[in-house]
Amino acid sequence: MQPDAAATANAHPPTELAAGVTKAVPIMLGYVVLAMAFGVLAREAGLTISETIAMSVIVFAGASQFIAAGMFAAAMSPAAIIMTTFLVNLRHILMSAALAPHLRGLRFHSYALLGWGVTDETFALNSTEYGRQPRHHWFMYGTNFAAYASWITGTIIGAFFGSLVPGIEQLPLGFALPAMFICLLVMQLSDRLLLYAAVLAGGLSLLLGQLLEGNWNIILATVLTATAASGWEKWKSSG
Amino acid sequence: MEKLWIIAAMGAATYLPRALPLAVLARMRIPEGFIRWLRFVPVAVLAALLAPELLLRGGAFDLTIRNQHLLAAVPCFLVAVKTKNLPLTVGVGLAAAILLQAVMP
């Protein structure tokens, strides 16, 4: 469960990097399309080309960028925009924590760089991969930075040429991401308790989403589910 | 120019929750109970993200055949359960989504 650096030290970094990039192809496909849509929308919201691209380079977080573009267009206060971004992206705190047991014994700069690329999609892929076998951290450099590159590429295309290919963002190519989530979720359901946890989390997320603003349903559903499931597991093993 | 400062602050607000837990936890001894808790996070997060994506349309429950995401998800689940093949599942999902949009725009 907890490979340390030594366990994966003989893996070949370039090979692992390439493996990560290859595995990230579905993410890249979805990101290019979504980022193009963002590029078009941000320009329509009144951001300049450089501001649009800067947001993808500096923030790299899909949903919050769409929201921020809308808030810029509505001339909302900087504090509101920054706070909304923080709250919408706060869920990554759980993903970052869940990756930690798989990435022991690295230098500080590795964590600083790997953390940059923790998104819903890269987390879904990496947690599946690292859960199945010990992986070198260069695999994660591959997935995370391939995803980052595709996000920036899509934004540039959308910001410059989006208006030239009308309708491209109307194609349901973004469905690559939910489709990927479905497969990764299925791959992670390795025992019955995990299956129950998935059902519980999905139900809680829907329920809480009707009651709460923003992304709190994701965070709360995850925290409640992990607490319930790990509590149940402990209770079963002690009894 | 002011927008760039806001964007920079957005970047920091996004980056810290992404990097800090990883940088701190990976370098310390994580209590056994917390490891057990973290084991459920991937499945829970994925399900929590997917459920609204597939079952809501415009913020409201939609379990009818007009919900194209839900329809397209059916072959995805079947292929995923059967093959556990990521590229194949994504390919089938995209084909289903494009087909559905063409048939019932």
Image (cartoon, grey):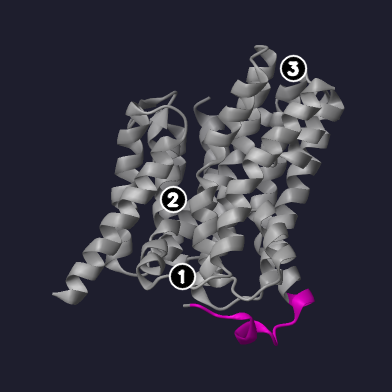
Residue A106 percent location from the top left of the image: 67, 73
Q: Amino acid at mark 3?
A: Glu
Q: Which residue is at 39% across, 53% downward?
A: B44
Look at mark 2 in the image and give the residue it sits on: B45
Instruction: Reply above or below: A1 against A157.
Output: below
* Boundaries of the magenta span: A2-15
Instruction: Check chain identity for marks 2 and 3: say if they share one.
Output: no
How many marks overall?
A: 3
Marks 2 and 3, how far apart at CA: 32 Å
Q: Which residue is at 37% across, 69% downward?
A: A190
Mark sitting on residue A174? none
Look at mark 3 in the image and give the residue it sits on: A44
Do the CB atoms of the residues marked 2 and 3 lie less than 8 Å apart?
A: no
Q: Amino acid at mark 1?
A: Ile
Question: Residue A118 vs residue A49: left or right?
Answer: left
The residue marked by circle 1 belongs to what chain? Answer: B
- Judging depth in this view, the residue of B95 and A138 nearest the camera is A138
Look at mark 1 in the image and give the residue it sits on: B30
Q: Residues within 10 Å of mark 3 (few under 14, many from 20)?
A: some
Q: Which residue is at 63% across, 47% downward?
A: B16
